[in-house]
Image: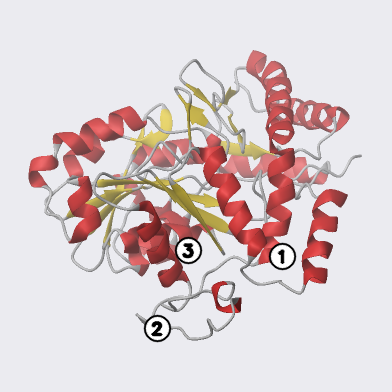
Amino acid sequence: MRNIPFSPPDITELEIQEVCEALRSGWITTGPRTKQLEKELAEYCHAAKLVCLNSATAAEEMNLRVLGIGEGDEVLVPAYTYTATAAAAIHVGATVKFIDSQKDSLEMDYDQMERAITERTKAVIPVDLGGIPCDYDRIYQAVEGKKALFCPKGDVQEALGRVAVVADCAHGLGASRHGVPTGALADFTSFSFHAVKNFTTAEGGASAWRTLPGLDDEELYHRYQLLSLHGQSKDALAKTKLGAWEYDIVGPWYKCNMTDLMAAIGLKQLERYPGLLERRHQLIQRYDEALHPLGIRTLPHFTPDYTSSGHLYLTWTPGIGEKERNEIILRMAERGVACNVHYKPLPMMTAYKAMGFDIADYPNAYHHYENLITLPLHTRLSDEDAAYVTEQFTDIVKEYLR
């Protein structure tokens, strides 16, 4: 029996050596490696600018704060997502309005999303779940169509003149739609570099944005620096210049910067990233070839419209419910294969039920969840490991197929 973990980090001697060099350099907090990673990631994503932070949750929150979103504002969020998507909006004091999934897709029901836009709506947060970019053309059509309702607050909202598209791209670094990479698709984007992600800095994340007419990208970058480092007018690197010790505190803000130790991992991950994405593509093809003949539905990762980052391999077995799904996951674990579920819709969670949300109002989200099983998909899987996963899954699932 093999032991197949769900999503271990893919770390090599390249990353280890770079971290050691960072340690030896004497510079371990935000410094030259973080700045270099920001530059290289911005170029990779075709973003105007990018700021590295300590998590994707912080990145999304900083995006909303730069937009001036707060109390009295509404933010539209998919019901089918991880808590960070909604929590960041709650952190800034906004009201979350959940949108159900489409019947045949994990993406938001864009018609419902468009109807939900009111004069209080300031942002919509599409989620590129599994690494598949959302239909941003349809999203922009919706927010442009409701421009007459938009009541801007502050210069960034004035520059947009409509509801902001703030992508949760925690899964999607390296994906693209119609040739445009994530990071350049939405107005603002948050990325995750958590340990289980395709690209990792152990923890970490980033905010990226497109150039907005009438706004200066360098000035926006400075706002992120202020918000993420206590409102301090100079970061530690800037204060190392001769005679440059003095700084100001322009606001009592937050502490969510990335360190050079984290950035050291990221710099080498980025060098390896094209190969990591290609390996995921190969594994997805192997899984598809084994499972599609059984009638098992999976996320379509590669189509003429988009290329996925291949972050998650989601499966739906026809004819089963929650009970059978959970049995299959347990039986896979007994055979040494760790599986998961992405995700349990937020209206089913205690915190969100306490806010008054009811899963009965999001039937499509529940339907996607009830028989979903996520198989391990990571670049430490060998071909033999992948074959073992599909062999065990096929053997077990055949008993449940009707």
Q: Which mark is residue 261?
A: 1
Q: Residue at x 65, y 17 (%)?
A: 294
Helix, strand or loop at label 2? It is loop
Q: Amino acid at mark 2?
A: Ile
State which tag comes first along the sequence, 3 or 1: 3
User: In the image, is 344 to the left or to the right of 12?
Assistant: left
User: In the image, is 320 to the left or to the right of 215?
Assistant: right
Q: Residue at x 28, y 52 (%)?
A: 215
Q: Amino acid at mark 3?
A: Ala
**Observer-nearest residue: 64 or 272?**
272
* Viewer-nearest of discs 3 and 1: 1
Q: Position of residue 367 (x, y in %)?
A: 43, 36
Check if mark 3's residue and mark 2's residue have beta carbons within 8 Å: no
Q: How far apart, in angstroms, are the residues tagged by discs 3 and 2?
A: 20 Å
Q: Quadrant of the C terminus?
A: top right
Residue 330 in view in this figure: yes
Residue 321 in view in this figure: no
Check if mark 3's residue and mark 1's residue have beta carbons within 8 Å: no
State which tag comes first along the sequence, 3 or 2: 3
Q: Position of residue 160 (x, y in %)?
A: 22, 46
Crowding at dot 2, Cα within 10 Å, few <14 / some 14-19 / many 20+, comes out as few
Q: Residue at x 38, y 65 (%)?
A: 223
Q: Amino acid at mark 1?
A: Leu
**The image quarter in which residue 222 lies:** bottom left
Q: Position of residue 262 (x, y in %)?
A: 68, 61
Quick one: which residue is furthest to the right in this view?
Answer: 1
Residue placed under numbered mark 2 in the picture: 249
Residue placed under numbered mark 3 in the picture: 58
Helix, strand or loop at label 1? It is helix
Q: Residue at x 42, y 71 (%)?
A: 226
